[in-house]
Image (cartoon, rainbow, N blue to C red):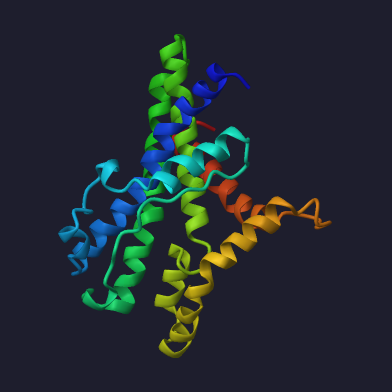
């Protein structure tokens, strides 16, 4: 793969991935403030300025490498927004709203990109073709990020939602698993990546993510008239 090809690939993924990841964190910060916790505000994180949320490794290097190696999953992360759950107006309930805010903004961005595709179609010029690819990638990147983050594993948003929904004794026990959350995720990613080598009949992560991803992509296409 020469530098021109690498540059072209990165150019149509850079903006979609950066916006999807950083807006996800900005939404957490904004809803946390609405629910009573101004921790993110004091640290300057209640903003949709991507620069405030970029993590050099998680937002730039990791997604870029996954794009270049042709990974079916483009995963990345921004600097986590600090939320003091005890300062929320109703910690158990508001934890759910703060967690849902990230995936929700990603789905809003996916729908917006799908609607914008109508403006760039058909792509008659090189510039229009570049915009068209960016918008297509924005749909996929945002849907993938929303679905991945709703896995019921702490510290992902799905884990936060489950913690807020469980009765307090069970929620407390489940919350104690957060210390192992990243190890669980890394293990899941490795097993899924080497599923064929390990003799598994399917990739666990792919089996969990693709059905809801495909369903959401079809829904977005139907609602926005792309189907």
In the rendered image, residue 178, in percent from the top left (x then y), is placed at 48, 74
Residue 65 is drawn in which quadrant? top right
Left or right, 211 with reference to 160: right
Spot occupied by residue 132 in the image (x, y as percentages of width and height): 45, 23
Who's the residue at 48% across and 25% down the image?
A: 133
As drawn, the residue found furthest toward the top would be: 125
Position above or below: 185 against 119: below
Report the front residue among 206 and 110.
206
Answer left or right for 108 relative to 225: left
In the image, 34 versus 84, the foreground residue is 84
Left or right: 180, with 50 as reference point:
right
Q: Residue at x 81, y 56 (%)?
A: 201
* Residue at 22% in and 68% down: 35
The quadrant of the image that shows the N terminus is top right
**At which x and y percent is residue 118?**
42, 24
The reply to whether residue 152 is in sight is: no
Quarter assignment of residue 69: top right
- In the displayed structure, 128 sits above or below 190; it is above
Q: Quadrant of the C terminus?
A: top right
Horizontal relation, residue 51 to residue 201: left or right: left
Q: Which residue is more in the foreground, 127 or 225? A: 127
Q: Is residue 93 above or below residue 139?
A: below
Total numbered badges shown on the rendered structure: 0
Residue 59 in view of the camera: yes
Extreme-right residue of the structure:
199
- What residue sits 44% from the left and 90% below the top? 169
Q: Position of residue 62 (x, y in %)?
A: 50, 44
């Amino acid at each position: 793969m020469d530098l021109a090809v690498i540059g072209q690939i990165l150019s149509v993924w850079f903006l979609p991935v950066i916006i999807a990841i950083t807006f996800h964190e900005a939404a957490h910060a904004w809803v946390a403030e609405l629910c009573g916790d101004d921790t993110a505000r004091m640290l300057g994180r209640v903003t949709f300025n991507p620069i405030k949320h970029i993590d050099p490794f998680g937002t730039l290097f990791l997604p870029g490498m996954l794009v270049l190696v042709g990974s079916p999953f483009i995963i990345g992360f921004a600097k986590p927004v600090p939320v003091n759950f005890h300062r929320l107006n109703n910690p158990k309930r508001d934890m759910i709203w703060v967690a849902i805010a990230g995936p929700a903004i990603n789905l809003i961005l996916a729908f917006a990109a799908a609607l914008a595709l109508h403006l760039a179609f058909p792509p008659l010029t090189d510039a229009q073709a570049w915009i068209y690819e960016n918008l297509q990638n924005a749909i996929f990147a945002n849907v993938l990020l929303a679905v991945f983050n709703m896995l019921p594993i702490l510290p992902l948003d799905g884990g936060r939602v489950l913690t807020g929904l469980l009765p307090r004794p069970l929620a407390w026990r489940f919350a104690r698993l957060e210390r192992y959350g990243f190890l669980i995720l890394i293990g899941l990613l490795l097993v899924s990546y080497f599923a064929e080598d390990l003799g598994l009949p399917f990739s666990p992560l792919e089996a969990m993510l693709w059905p809801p991803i495909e369903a959401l992509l079809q829904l977005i296409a139907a609602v926005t008239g792309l189907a």
